[in-house]
Amino acid sequence: MNVYIVEDDVFHLEDIKITLEELRYSCVGSSDDPFIAQEEIGALQPDAVILDIHLHGKDSGIVLGDTIKKLYGIPIFFTTSDKDKEMMRKAAEISPVAYLTKPVSKDDLQAALILASKQEKSFENGIEGGFDEIFVKSGNKLVKVDINTILFAHTDSKNYCSIITSDLKKLSVRYSILKLAQKLNSQDFVQTHRSYIINWNMIESFHEYDQTIEIQGHHIPIGRTFKDDIYKKLNII
């Protein structure tokens, strides 16, 4: 299990890293800067994030935690030495896996990571699925996208995908095509090619000659690996 740590106290940071190592988990990165942390978490896609609720004396940890969950769907849990009930209430609103008091004990950390692992597995298997919208970062804002308006998505690079919607918006997300398919987690979204997934309900025609699917003027390729499954799903008469 890969874990990212957001912590501004070097002693607590090192303590958590040592405990993770003892528990045989991997720390894939750390930062005390919310902006750097968000960028690195998006790139690294860890299995869980350990997040200090008070970064440099502020509640920016809560804001960052909310953003991480909305953008990446990664389980988070907060660490703090503060027992302020109002702060706990704010943190609880974004549904963290756990709320751990510093110094974090080995048993508490292990229990939290086990819960995070189960939450991630449930997410990937669709147990927590059924959502109708996602939020996609565009510039300095989060844009709400109804998943039923998504036409298709394709890879721009190893870690980025572009989502194309029915109103011809093009939104870039930091996901591989496989990870994005897991995030959308619906029978309506089908992978047709190693670089493409489509909204099956948006298909207008299938071109046998060049092996493409047409969706609002876009011709989506069908890869050899996916051809048989696509033909079966087309329900040709």
Image (cartoon, grey):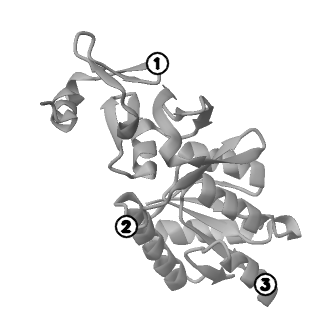
Mark 2 residue type: Ile
| Residue 77 vertical position relative to residue 191 in the rendered view, above or below | below
Residue lying furthest top: 209
- Residue 67, horizontal then vertical, whole percent: 68, 57
Q: Nearer the viewer, residue 19 or 58?
A: 58
Mark 1 residue type: Gly
Please name the residue shown 60% across and 34% down the image: 172
Sooner in the amino-acid sequence: mark 3 or mark 2? 3
Quick check: marks 3 and 1 in contact, CB under 8 Å? no
Q: CA distance from mark 3 to mark 1?
A: 56 Å
Element class at badge 2: loop
- Residue 186, horizontal then vertical, whole percent: 37, 51
* The N terminus sits in image quarter: bottom left
Element class at badge 3: loop
Give the label, 2 or 1, closer to the camera.
1
- Residue 17, horizontal then vertical, whole percent: 58, 65
Instruction: Determine if residue 84 is in view.
Output: no
Crowding near the residue tagged with mark 1, few <14, some 14–19, many ≥20 C-alpha atoms within 10 Å: few
Give the label, 3 or 2, closer to the camera.
2
Sooner in the amino-acid sequence: mark 2 or mark 1? 2
Residue 82's disc number? 3
Crowding near the residue tagged with mark 2, few <14, some 14–19, many ≥20 C-alpha atoms within 10 Å: few
Mark 3 residue type: Asp
* The C terminus sits in image quarter: top left
Residue 58's disc number? none
Residue for badge 2: 127
Residue 217's disc number? 1
Element class at badge 1: loop
